[in-house]
Amino acid sequence: MIKFFLGIDIDDVSLVVNYDMPVTMDNKPDFETYLHRIGRCGRFGKLGYTFNLISSDQDFNTMKAIEEYFHHPIDEITIEAIGNLEPDQT
C-alpha cells in the first residue's frame, strides 16, 4: 500500500480538531501526520487552536509520545472549561 497526502491550503484556519490521533499502519504514533494536521491552524502569526479528542488509552499514549517527540507539552482542557478559553496573546 502506498500512502500519500495531498495537502490543502485553506486561508484563515483557526481550529483543528483531531477526532483520532494519527498512527501508522502498525499503530505507532505518526508524528509527520500530526504536524501536518496542526500546521493548518494559526498560520502566519494568526491565533489558532488544536483540540485532540482522547477517547482511549491508545489515544492518550499516542498524545504523550507526540509531546515527547516534539518536546512540547499538550495542555489538557475539560469540556466544562472550553467556554472559558481566551486568546493567547503571547
Image: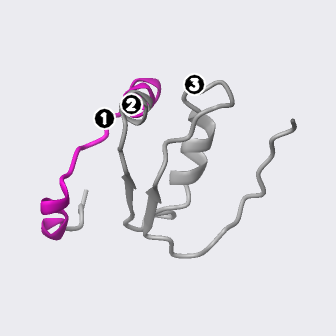
Residue mark closest to the camera, 2 vs 3: 3
The numbered mark, 3 or 1, whose residue comes first in the sequence reads: 3
Residue denoted by label 2? 67
Dot 3: few (<14), some (14–19), or many (≥20) neighbours within 10 Å? few
Q: Please tell me whether mark 1 sits on a helix, a strand or a loop.
A: loop
Secondary structure mostly taken by the magenta-highlighted segment of the chain: helix
> What residue sits 49% from the left and 42% below the top?
21
Residue denoted by label 1? 73
In the image: residue 53, left or right of residue 19: left
Separation (CA) of disc 2 from disc 1: 5 Å
Q: Position of residue 36 (x, y in %)?
A: 60, 48
Q: Please tell me whether mark 2 sits on a helix, a strand or a loop.
A: helix
> What residue sits 54% from the left and 29% below the top?
29
Q: What stretch is highlighted in magenta?
A: 63-85
- In the image, residue 19 sits, relative to residue 31, either above or below, namely below
Residue denoted by label 3? 28
Q: Position of residue 85 (x, y in %)?
A: 18, 65
The numbered mark, 2 or 1, whose residue comes first in the sequence reads: 2
Amino acid at the residue labelled 2: Glu
Q: Please tell me whether mark 3 sits on a helix, a strand or a loop.
A: loop
In the image: residue 24, left or right of residue 83: right
Magenta stretch: includes residue 66: yes
